[in-house]
Amino acid sequence: MYLILHILIVAAVVARVLLRRHRDPTSRVAWIVVVLALPFLGVLAYVLLGETSIGRKRAERLYKVMSDMPGMDEVPGWSGATGKVGTDPQHESLFRVGEHISGYAATAGNQARLMASSDAAIESMIADIESAADHVHLLFYIWLPDNNGSRMARALIRAAARGVKCRAMVDDMGSRLLIKSTLWTEMESAGVALCRVLKVGNPLLRIFNGRIDLRNHRKIVVIDNRVTYCGSQNCADPEFLVKKKFAPWVDVVVRFTGPVVRQNQHLFASDWMAYANEDIREILLQPLATVGPGFAAQVIASGPTLRHSAMPEIFESLIYAARRRLFITTPYYVPLESLQAAICAAGNRGVDTSIIFPARNDDFAVGATCRSYYEDLLAAGVRVYEYQAGLLHAKTLTVDDELTLVGSANMDRRSFDLNYENNILSCDRELTLQVLGRQQEFLADCREVTAEEVAGWGWSRRLLHNALAIVGPVL
């Protein structure tokens, strides 16, 4: 009777895997392998980790907030931000992909500055907070109570003391050390409005209210509707003490001014109003300053309750648009077949294509899975590098010295299906050359992987890489 019951449960779970919407075939196969190969545990794994629900009540609240929020076209003066984008037809089509994903159209008149380092980015953020006159909004996946994390908190406390409205939001799992620290209570006592996103609570009860490892992976800083930051960096020291053996963590962050700031503000507000239950729409409706000279840029947001397959689509669209040069850095590479094919196609059609991965990944399984794709990349003429001087955490993509994508999204299944992410796509030769220059600087600390080296890997290493790649969608 127990055997029959087990078979029926397994059959029901397999049917669920096959019937669930928006799941690519390789993901279905991976989960079926797990469910069938691991009696009891496979079913439990799917129950805990197989779905992408954040919980019915959370989802309803998010949808309601989004439906009630003012659109960008309701911002006084917004028409001046979209009337003179001035990109060529190919670039316009790429911005339309981004607009279809998260609803934000390309904006004109933006300026940007690439931060020199992780510490320099924190210094710049703090300097902007010190000059804030109205509000400071922060969202980080990981905020540690270390040197940089403490300095950021102290800057918020000082700003709140002089009457600036400070709102700080963190992911409940990623920033748990800060939440448990005295720094969290000090900020709260000083009048900084705090919010924990996707609270874990009791893990045994949490599983009945949505998948526990769906996280808010965004990194957003917006100050006075005049400046925003976007990139891969969490609020922490490069030494990243929670995983110090992989340090330093090397990130790329860009400081933006111009209308694109309002899009990042709108994205922050959607999360804040959903989780903090405070209506901050009046900030979104502050008149937009006259749009000056600058380039086209656009926020591209994604998440499990937003548009399906968002990040793979924008990655692949940019990669297929490349005609001369394509350069990618990503710490986590567990791609869809279509993304891997897009990168290989770039190499095969003669595009100068380079991609950098970390030599030592903080997730062993993801690092091994990533290497299972090396052979096909190299065969297509893609130059593959491994960064040796720490963990290259930067998520960057540059195309033809004209287009740049920076943000929080990795090229892995977590960023595609599970995490809330934010990125900014820019069309500006000067910024692209700055980011490309940084990408090329990374090469000084890289080792190039050759086809001969990969061909010489032993059978046991290949077995490990390829076996983990089979369950890559589960990772």
Image: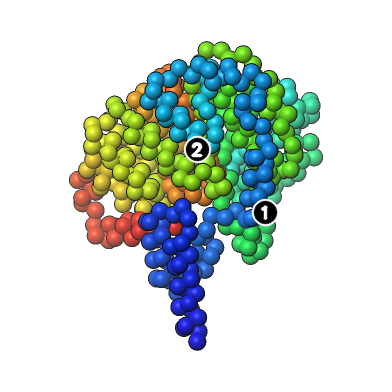
The answer to whether 28 is drawn above or below residue 277 in the figure is: below
Tag shown at residue 475: none
Query: Which is nearer the eye, 103 or 140?
Result: 103
Secondary element at tag 2: helix
Q: Answer with left or right where residue 142 lies relative to residue 97.
A: right
State which quarter of the image contains the C terminus. Answer: bottom left
Q: Answer with left or right where residue 471 lies relative to residue 301.
A: left
Question: Residue 410, percent across and down?
Answer: 45, 42
In the rendered structure, which amino acid carries the disc numbered 2? Ile
Tag shown at residue 101: 2
In the rendered structure, which amino acid carries the disc numbered 1? Lys
Residue 216: in sight, yes or no? yes
- Which residue occupies 39% across, 29% down? 398
Q: Dot 2, how many residues are within 10 Å of its Cα: few (below 14), some (14-19), or many (20+)?
A: many
Q: Residue pushed farthest bottom?
A: 1
Closer to the N terminus: mark 1 or mark 2? 1
- Which residue occupies 50% across, 87% down? 1
The answer to whether 361 is drawn above or below residue 279 in the figure is: below
